[in-house]
Amino acid sequence: MSPEAGYTLAAEGALASLVSQFSSRLDCFRELVQNSIDAGSRRIDVRLEWEPGAGGQGTSAIHVWDDGEGMTAAIIDQELTRLFASSKEDDLTKIGKFGIGFVSIFALAPRAVLVHTGRQGEAWEVLFHEDRSYDRLPLPTACEGTRITLFVPGDAARHAELAAGAREALWRWCRFTPVALWFEDRASGRPAELIRAPFAVEGECPVRVEAEGMELALAWSECPTHGFYNRGLTLLETADTDEAVGARAALFRRVSFRARADKLEHTLSRETVYRDENLARVLEALEAAVCGPLADALADELERLAALPAPGPLELGRGLRLLAFLSAAPFEVLRRLEDRPLLAAHDGPPRSLADVWATARQGPVALGAERTAVAEALHAQGGFCLREGPEGQVRRLLLRYLLERERRSALGVLSTLFGLDLRADAGRPRDWLGYHPEERLGARLVAPEDGYLAVELLPAPGPDALALLAAAQALLAGAGVGFRELGACRLRDPLPEPPLLLQGPRLTPLMPRAWLRPRGPEQAWPVAAVNLEHPQARACLAAQPVQPRVAACALARALALASAEAPLSVEALLGAAADRRGGGAG
Amino acid sequence: MGAEPARMRRLQDEAAATYARDLAQVLAGARLNQQYPDAAAVAAWTACMAQAVRLGLLPGLEVDLRSGLPARGMWERLRADAALAPASLAVLRPLPELEQRARRYPRGPYQDHLRRHAHYTALGGLPPYPCEALAAAPRREAGAGQAASYQLTLDTLGADGLPVRLGLHVRVAPVKRCPPLALRGEAVLPSAEFAARLRALAGLDAELAFTRLAEEPGLTPLELLRGSLGPVFVGGLRSEGPAAEAGAPFVGTFGLERAGTEGAEGDNDPLSASAPVERTGEEARACAGARARLGFRVFRDRKLVVPAALVPAVQAWCQGRGTRNVVYGLEAP
């Protein structure tokens, strides 16, 4: 035994409790790979061999060899074999911090551990015994890097289990490392395998973002997973969004990501990523990536799909799936993309969320799974009917966008007008809006047939009708409720209770049904058409040749009742008629 | 008076391809860690040079017979091509169309376009250029009474044609004027002047480089590592030392010098004797003064890759020169 022999591994009790906190004894492979990366290795070989012995028992030899900077005697004695004696503790360029990496190999209960290492002309063999005492002896030949061999007793089944576990641990913890990490179980007869996977995530519209000291991979996903890594070593991988990002979870419910950053750290027990300001910076970068490049990638693909002239079922399904991701995205993402034509229409160009907002402020927004005659007519008069999915995906997205947009818009107005300190998350909207926006906006998202009335405008309804309308219009104008334009029309669709009057900002072959509702006198629409097939209109028309003034007065009153919530009195109309008569005589 | 020996050899077609393949094997066999330039990248770029020769886009692969590695001009040429590759690919027609046109008009320009397409595509898939990069990262934050320290890594092509990696651990005190390193958010950016001085250091041996670094205002060097690739001789090119004496078909040597305030003093480089470091009087005085002032030590090392059968002979040759080196054996490429 050399003069250096006879050291004992320090703090054995602490070791047992520390290593027991690891999720698996085989996690020691992650620790060894981490040490090798910190030592500057570009290649690490993990190789297992099985040496059969007597009585079915034998020895598994587990080799972990690296090309790192190796160790001197001082490093072996002062750092390798002592817990919490790592010189890397405050070194920002290293992953390891705690000085427990190497000793974790004893969790595998090896019969012996042999280490060959060399640095700056020194070359050492260190033999750890079963009781963890060790001998350090000089090697006769030069050596570089660190070559660790564990001798673990057991039978062939135990070896196979060990090999499978080691491989699984390496894939789990080390598959994104930048080093060439090779695994080989010679007993299996299979060739060496490179443990490496591309740093990417599965999902739709994947993007990669490189920021200062970090690399992010993100994609939209229905079953998202989240991972944090330091130089490719896994710190945390989970499908639990709350566990991964805490208070930011809402943003990542449909986003898979992997984040690699040199400053991320693991906890002492390696169970998760350390929650500190470095993690906060990574989360900020992830948030920016979701609202930026990832949202843009989604919009690019949605735009492409929405613009396809004749999409097949696959494209249609994909477009709806992507829209569902957009529905789950934060409102900031929707605002960012609101001017982009993401929504496929049955005829005409794709539409944007901003188009929908503008349309919904004036009337119904048509959605339909099928292309119908009403949808075509709508397109012909400059409107649109959006292509809906079988599960109402488009409606869900639009309702979310419109609600939030209205809520924020109302908040802004209230804050400006009354100086109220209303935050964006203030209470239920109906409490301070005075109405239930979800119901009101929901009612505007309708099938084209439910939202519009097909109308035949009659520019030449006949001399009696023209005279009657002119007289009634004059009476109404005299009473201060006249229309800028009063025409005649006929409904194309039979209704149980057809309206007498159709009014709106303009007359079109498709009139929004919402315009049929009576409005206050000051809100009355400027343009209107009388439904000549309405019983009251028919009665007035019949009276027109015989008693034109009575017919005009009756129609005017009926129109006033139909157009305004506050009806005009007969006296007011008669007064208007008398004035008109007097004026006419004058 | 004899003619001066040729310094370059131009390899054509198959010889260039064989050279690139053999060089890659020797570089891989050396198991070079992060203290050395990226050997895999050097091999990949050399293979691309050989491909360019095969495609007729280069007149040959010129090898510097001092280093056994591609000549400086080859690196520069390919680096320029790589910079132009995206724009050049953009003006070429898509590959299927080029292939179709090349078939239809065999005497037209499309064969040449196809070759260029292959070359630029290959350049796009290469790892980062291995002979020109400077990276800086914080290593230790400022503590009580101590300035922050930084890790700098410089890759360059040395004056002797060898790819060199300089790894520096330096402590930087805050200075008001012309700081060598500036912090921009999380990033550490060396100033242009400091970067130029670092590149000049790469041509010096570790002792003199450490001495010069210590002369930088506000900067205290703690450790300097200088890893170099080569000389590497494959394919019967000129060789020196034990492998040549034994008639080895290839030999690779990889030097590593370390200067630092911690660690051992020594010379474990068997080639030191044949290429001793030459100093001017001023340099020698500066080194001696810096050693006395900073107490740093220098260790020179070298590992070799030779045919497996020659490992014992090469080890013995090293021992004969008073060194004990890592010698990797490789079956003849």
Image (cartoon, grey):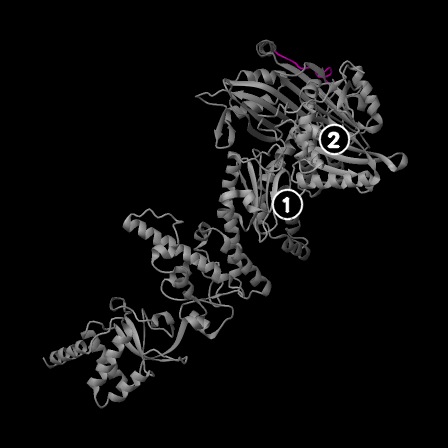
Magenta stretch holds residue B61: no
**Residue B217 or A50: which is nearer the viewer?**
A50
Which percent across, then down, holds residue B52? 68, 41
**Residue A249 or A359: which is nearer the viewer?**
A249
**Residue drawn at point x = 52 percent, y = 34 percent:** A276
Residue with the most extreme right position: A54
Say if A533 sits above or below B260 in the image: below
Which percent across, then down, holds residue A370? 51, 70
Mark number, residue B121: 1
Q: Chain under label 2?
A: A
Q: Please state which amino acid type lies under the numbered disc 1.
A: Thr
Mark number, residue A65: 2
Which percent across, then down, holds residue A578? 14, 80
Mark number, residue A77: none
Say if A569 sits above or below B73 in the image: below
Same-subunit check for callouts 2 and 1 = no
Secondary structure under the numbered disc 1 in the rendered image: helix
Give the image quarter of residue A381: bottom left
Q: Chain under label 1?
A: B
**Residue A138 or B201: which is nearer the viewer?**
A138
Give the image quarter of residue A130: top right
Give the image quarter of residue B63: top right
Region in magenta? B270-280
Q: Please state which amino acid type lies under the numbered disc 2.
A: Trp
